Amino acid sequence: MKKIICLTAILMSAACVIAQSNKQVEDGIFKINALLPGVSYEIGVGNTTTINAEAIIGFALRGASNVETEFGIYPGLAVDFRHYLNFERRLRKRKNISGNSGNYISFLNQFQFGTPLIGNLEYASDYYYNAAIVYGLQRTYKKGFYWSLAFGPGVFINEFDKVTGLLVDLRLGWVVGGRK
């Protein structure tokens, strides 16, 4: 856990060092996520770097014949530090970079509680934490629709276990106010 905190501090410091007045990223984007319900806010902290913070709601359902059906609605948080890689190339090809449409690398943190806000399906662990270095793509279209796909190696931690694996994160939604 100390290593993760140190890496986050280093990445945040790097964002401050690279900060310039000539930003290619948006100053701030408020997004509504539809696939995994929630909201996110992506704020530009440098020329090609952003911090994206999300509040999400997860849903789980368990049931079978001769078994009582249980469900749960779980709160979660996610924060990632993004560095966009291909804005210059996209601009040269006359492609859109509005709404931070581009490819990025990111340090992604996700946290979800194991106790439901609503429902009776309780997970074995009280929390779930994921940390990963991911490569991602984000595209925002004229009417404000956006999608994002990120994947990369990660660590998955709960009260009882710590494992490594591949994290895949898909988002679909709308930018409030459309793209700029």
Image (cartoon, grey):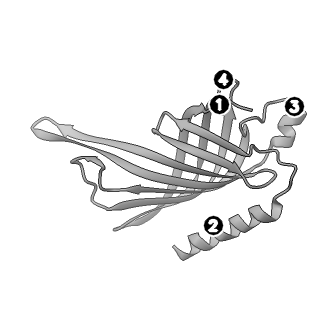
Residue extending farthest to the right is 92
Give the mark, 2 or 1, whose residue is nearer the N terminus.
2
Q: Given this view, does label 1 or label 4 mark the residue nearer the observer?
A: 1
Compute the Cα span from label 1 to label 4: 9 Å
Quick check: 163 left or right of 131?
A: left
Q: Are marks 1 and 4 in contact (CB under 8 Å)?
A: no
Label 4: state its secondary structure.
loop
The residue where tag 2 is placed is 8
Give the mark, 4 or 2, whose residue is nearer the N terminus.
2
- Amino acid at circle 4: Lys
Towards the viewer: 47 or 162: 47
Which percent across, then down, holds residue 2? 55, 76
Compute the Cα span from label 3 to label 4: 22 Å
Quarter of the figure with residue 176: top right
Which residue appears at 46% of the width and 46% of the height? 56
The residue where tag 3 is placed is 93
Quick check: 120 left or right of 109?
A: left
Disc 1 packing (10 Å; few <14; some 14–19; many ≥20): few
The residue where tag 4 is placed is 143
- Amino acid at circle 3: Lys
Give the mark, 2 or 3, whose residue is nearer the N terminus.
2
Disc 3 packing (10 Å; few <14; some 14–19; many ≥20): few
Which percent across, then down, holds residue 125? 31, 61
